[in-house]
Image (cartoon, rainbow, N blue to C red):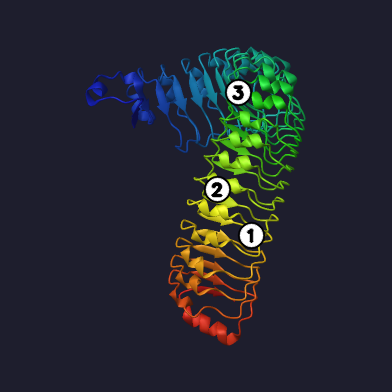
């Protein structure tokens, strides 16, 4: 089978040089052996490579990925023009010392194998620009790896590295460096002037060197899942930074210099120990992702309202007692997550969020919902379970787009007949309240699919419950229904899976 690299018209394809063909069948390639430059033998369950591959004297790119190789095929050493070699997803344990015979090699991808080391002679591949050894079992790198002066991309994610050799800092042309998921306790960062992406996540780092700020071209920085307690002030010098991952560390405070990184679009800070945010965090006006859940925040600065591009605000599992009124300025918000905080209410300014579709405010101390919520005409999902509500404002029953309402585990004693106005409602959860009766209007919820009324004080239902023709699940365990009433309900709702 042949593949063409690029798009061509029918006439252009006829004139196309055969050198541009990408073969996926060795026998067919051998029919044009002097002209073949690219060969893709990936995913062919190969356990060894045929010797006659050496006849492809001009082969420059070879893909042997996703096969069943256990030994590096030494026959490849005779392919002197080979520039790109992909051996990913095999079971190779060692690279032979003869690897240095591939003098023209520029790209070596041997990720997802069983490598335990790299041969010293790999540093003789002086044309190598990309080396990928991710997801192997390599414990150390060759001491003189710094001789690979042309290296632009080095990926060693998911190995067992405990330290980097001193010569590693000589790889000054690096643009992308992946060292995540190793066992590094320290790193040196000062000499990679061209570095654009740095991944040192999932290691054992307790601090980041102050010279981090010298990485002027850095756009992506992955530091998650370490043991960091703070960031260096010099982080403010990374003026091109767009993505910053700091989640799952032990950071208590952010340096004020962080807010000078005005190009930031993604900041992940969840699962830390943050007590507060910088007052001028609103300067990060290009943010599209800001994750702050699972921290120790008690309040948010008013400037957070300047983050007008954020579609989601993730603040669950903190200690927030209130939300700033500037929340209403975050015009792009579609989802708000504030579960498991200490909120007593939601700000009235929330009514300004015309794009909001989901509010998750369960497990707080909310005793009263603002009637302004009724102005959120696009609201589809509202979760307010585990609060102190005794009622839901009548205005909220007019939310025509609402399809999910969870008000369980409150102290609600009654529902208005206006509940019938929730025309789109599909799931209604009212378990663990103090309901004694249900309004007749509940039988008019024609789109209702699931109804949960467990642990209330109900002793009867409206007479026309059978009108809920789309209802599929109905649970009302631990109420006050007699066996005779239960039998009647089952008969009335014979199409429904009922749980008493």
| Quarter of the image where one finds residue 306 | top right
- Checking the image for residue 385, the label placed there is 1
- Which residue matches tag 3? 96
Q: Can residue 140 be seen in this view?
A: no
- The Cα atoms of the two marked residues, 1 and 3, are separated by 62 Å
Relative to 365, 458 lies left or right? left
**Residue 30 x %, y %:** 36, 24
Residue 333 found in image quarter:
top right
- Circle 2 SS class: helix
The answer to whether 488 appears left or right of 337 in the picture is: left
Residue 209 position within the rendered picture, expressed as x and y whole percent measured from the top left: 74, 22
Looking at the rendered structure, the secondary structure element under dot 1 is loop
Quadrant in which the N terminus is drawn: top left
Q: Which of marks 3 and 2 is nearer the N terminus?
A: 3
Q: Which residue, given by chain and number where applicable, does mark 2 sit on? A: 351
Upstream in sequence: badge 2 or badge 1: 2
Q: Is residue 171 above or below residue 6?
A: above
Query: Which secondary structure lies at badge 3?
Result: loop
Disc 3 and disc 2: Cα gap in Å? Answer: 67 Å
Place residue 284 in its image quadrant.
Answer: top right
Q: Position of residue 180 (x, y in %)?
A: 65, 31
Q: Distance between the residues labelled 2 and 1?
A: 21 Å
- The structure residue drawn at horizontal position 43% and vertical position 72%, both measured from the top left corner, is 469
Residue 365: assigned label: none
- Looking at the rendered image, the quarter that the C terminus falls into is bottom right
The 10 Å Cα crowd at callout 1, few under 14, some 14 to 19, many 20 or more, is many
Q: Which of marks 1 and 3 is nearer the N terminus?
A: 3
Q: Toward the viewer: 378 or 479?
A: 378
Please rate how many residues cluster around mark 3, counting C-alpha atoms within 10 Å: few if below 14, some from 14 to 19, many from 20. Answer: some
The x, y position of residue 11, in whole percent, is: 22, 23
Foreground of the two, 25 or 290: 290
């Amino acid at each position: 089978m042949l593949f063409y690299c690029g798009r061509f018209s029918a006439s252009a394809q006829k004139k196309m040089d055969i050198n541009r063909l990408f073969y996926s069948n060795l026998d067919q390639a051998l029919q044009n052996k002097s002209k073949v430059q690219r060969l893709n033998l990936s995913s062919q369950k190969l356990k060894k490579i045929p010797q006659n591959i050496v006849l492809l004297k001009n082969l420059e790119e070879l893909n042997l990925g996703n096969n069943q190789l256990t030994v590096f095929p030494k026959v490849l050493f005779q392919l002197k023009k080979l520039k790109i070699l992909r051996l990913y997803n095999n079971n190779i344990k060692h690279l032979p010392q003869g690897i240095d015979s591939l003098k023209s090699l520029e790209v070596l991808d041997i990720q997802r194998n069983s490598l335990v080391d790299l041969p010293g002679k790999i540093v003789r591949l002086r044309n190598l620009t990309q080396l990928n050894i991710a997801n192997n079992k390599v414990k150390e790198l060759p001491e003189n790896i710094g001789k690979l002066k042309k290296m632009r991309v080095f990926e060693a994610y998911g190995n067992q590295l405990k330290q980097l050799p001193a010569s590693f800092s000589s790889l000054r042309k690096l643009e992308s460096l992946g060292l995540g998921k190793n066992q590094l306790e320290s790193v040196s960062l000062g000499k990679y002037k061209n570095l654009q992406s740095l991944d040192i996540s999932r290691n054992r780092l307790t601090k980041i060197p102050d010279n981090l700020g010298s990485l002027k071209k850095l756009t992506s920085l992955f530091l998650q899942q370490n043991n960091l307690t703070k960031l260096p002030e010099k982080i403010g010098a990374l003026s091109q930074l767009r993505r910053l991952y700091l989640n799952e560390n032990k950071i208590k405070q952010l340096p004020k210099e962080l807010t000078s990184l005005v190009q930031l679009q993604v900041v992940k800070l969840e699962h830390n120990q943050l007590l507060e945010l910088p007052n001028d965090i609103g300067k990060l006006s290009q943010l599209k992702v800001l994750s702050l859940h699972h921290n120790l925040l008690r309040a948010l600065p008013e400037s957070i309202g300047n983050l007008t591009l954020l579609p989601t605000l993730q603040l669950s599992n903190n200690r927030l007692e209130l939300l700033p009124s500037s929340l209403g300025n975050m015009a792009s918000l579609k989802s708000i997550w504030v579960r498991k905080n200490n909120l007593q209410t939601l700000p009235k300014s929330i009514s300004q969020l015309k794009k909001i579709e989901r509010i998750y405010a369960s497990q707080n101390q909310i005793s009263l919902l603002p009637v302004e919520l009724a102005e959120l005409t696009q609201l589809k999902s509202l979760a307010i379970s585990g609060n102190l509500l005794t009622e839901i404002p009548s205005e909220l029953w007019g939310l025509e787009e609402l399809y999910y309402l969870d008000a369980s585990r409150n102290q609600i004693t009654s529902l208005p007949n206006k509940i019938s106005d929730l025309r789109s409602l599909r799931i209604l959860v009212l378990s663990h309240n103090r309901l004694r009766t249900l309004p007749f209007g509940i039988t008019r919820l024609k789109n209702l699919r699931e109804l949960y009324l467990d642990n209330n004080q109900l002793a009867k239902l409206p007479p026309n419950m059978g009108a809920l023709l789309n209802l599929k699940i109905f649970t009302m365990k631990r109420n006050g229904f007699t066996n005779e009433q239960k039998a009647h309900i089952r008969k009335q709702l014979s199409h429904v899976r009922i749980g008493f």
